[in-house]
Image (cartoon, rainbow, N blue to C red):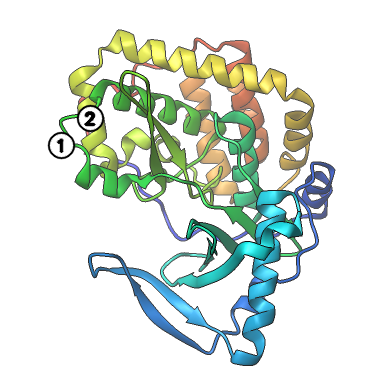
Amino acid sequence: MAIISKKKIPFKISDRLRTYLRKYDRLVDLPIRYMDLTRYDNSIPLYDRHGNDTLWETVFYPQEEMSDIHFALKKIYAILKADGDLGVMDHLFVDRVDLCVYGNTQPFRVRIVNHLNDNFDYFYIKQGDASRIYGLELEHLLSPNWISYVVFENTLIEEHIVGIPAEQFIKTHLQDPNLNKIRLAKEFVKFNERCFVRLLGDMHSSNFVVDITPDFEDVDYRLRAIDFDQQSYEGRKAVYLPQYFKQNNPIIKIGLKYLTPESVHQYQREERALIANRVKMEKTRIDDLMEVMSGETLSSEKNIISLSKDLSIHYDEPDFLKCENMGQLVRLSLDMVTKNPGLYKDEYWISSKRS
C-alpha cells in the first residue's frame, strides 16, 4: 500500500525555471495575484446538487472591489483560453469564486459563464510551487493531454481538467451495465505506466479524473491527473504507482479479472513506446526542462537517496545511485524509456496481493 509520509512543502519558483517558462510562453503578466483573492470579507459553504458539503466555500468581496476583481478574472480567462483576445470578455461574467479550504495550497476556483448560452467553464488560481509547475509541464509534454497554464510572479493559473472524479466514478459507474471494463482496465495500466515513468506521485482516486469519450461502436476512457503537487517528491517507489493505492482497488480488481499478464505487458510496452516517441518529438524542450530541473531542490536528501535505491533495483541500473536530486532521477527514468521502451517488471498490476 502506498502512503504519503507527511504534508509536502512548496518549493520556490527559481530564476532558472522562470527563464524556461518565459522561453515557452508560460510566463505572462496578469492583472491579479493569488494574494489579491484572499481579501474576501465573507464566505458560505458550497453544497452540491444533492445537498452534500463539497468542502469548498464560495467567497465574496467588498462591493467597492468586486467589479475590478471580476474584470481581472475575465481577463485571465481570455489569456488562458483565447490567447489574450479580450473580445471574448464581452459575453462572460464571473458567476462564483470558490476557495478549497481543505487543500494544502488552498486554491481558488473561478466559475465563468457565457450569458449568451449559459455555458460555463472553470479555472484555478493557486500559489506558485515549483513541484506543481514541473508536474504540469511533464504532463503537457509526456502524456496524451495538453495542459494550459500560466505563471505570474508567485501565482499559478491552471485550466480546469474535464472528467468525472475517479472517486465518484468508482461509486456511481462501476456497476453500469454499459461499462466497458476491459477498456477501463487497459487505460488504468497505461495511466499507471505514465505516472511511474515521469515520477508523478499520489495518484489515488481523489487526484485523477475519468474522461469518457463516445466511440462509434463503444466508449473510450482516459484517466487524467488533476493534482501535480507530488511530482517527484516522495522517497518510495510505490507512491509513483497508482496500483498501490487502496482507493484505486475497485478498478484494479476489474483488471485482475479481465486482463491477462500478457495483455498487461503489451499495454505497458505500448505506453512506454508512446512516451519514448513524445520524448523524441519534444527533445529540445524536454532537454531544456531537464537541464533546469536537474539543478533544483525538489525534495529532501533522505527521499532522494531512498528513491534512487528503489529505482536502481527496479531497473537493475546502478546509475540511479549517482543521482543527486529528483530532477536527475526523472531524467534518467526518461532515458530508460527511450533506450528500452519494452522494459517492464512483473510486479506491475498483476500481483494479487493488494492491501
Q: Secondary structure at mark 2?
A: loop
Amino acid type of disc 2? Answer: Leu
Amino acid type of disc 1? Answer: Gln
Q: Are marks 2 and 1 in contact (CB under 8 Å)?
A: yes
**Residue at the image point whose x is 40% and y is 43% from the top:** 209
Q: Residue furthest front?
A: 116
Q: Which residue is mark 2?
A: 179
Horizontal arrangement in the rendering, residue 44 relative to residue 292 (left or right)? left
The answer to whether one can see residue 302 in this image is yes
**Residue at the image point whose x is 24% and y is 43% from the top:** 170
User: Is residue 240 shown above or below 106?
Assistant: above
Q: Which residue is mark 1?
A: 175
Q: Position of residue 354 (x, y in %)?
A: 22, 33
User: Is residue 107 shown above or below 206?
Assistant: below
The answer to whether one can see residue 351 in this image is no
Horizontal arrangement in the rendering, residue 249 relative to residue 106 (left or right)? left
- Give the quadrant of residue 291: top right
Q: Secondary structure at mark 1?
A: loop
Q: Position of residue 243 (x, y in %)?
A: 33, 33
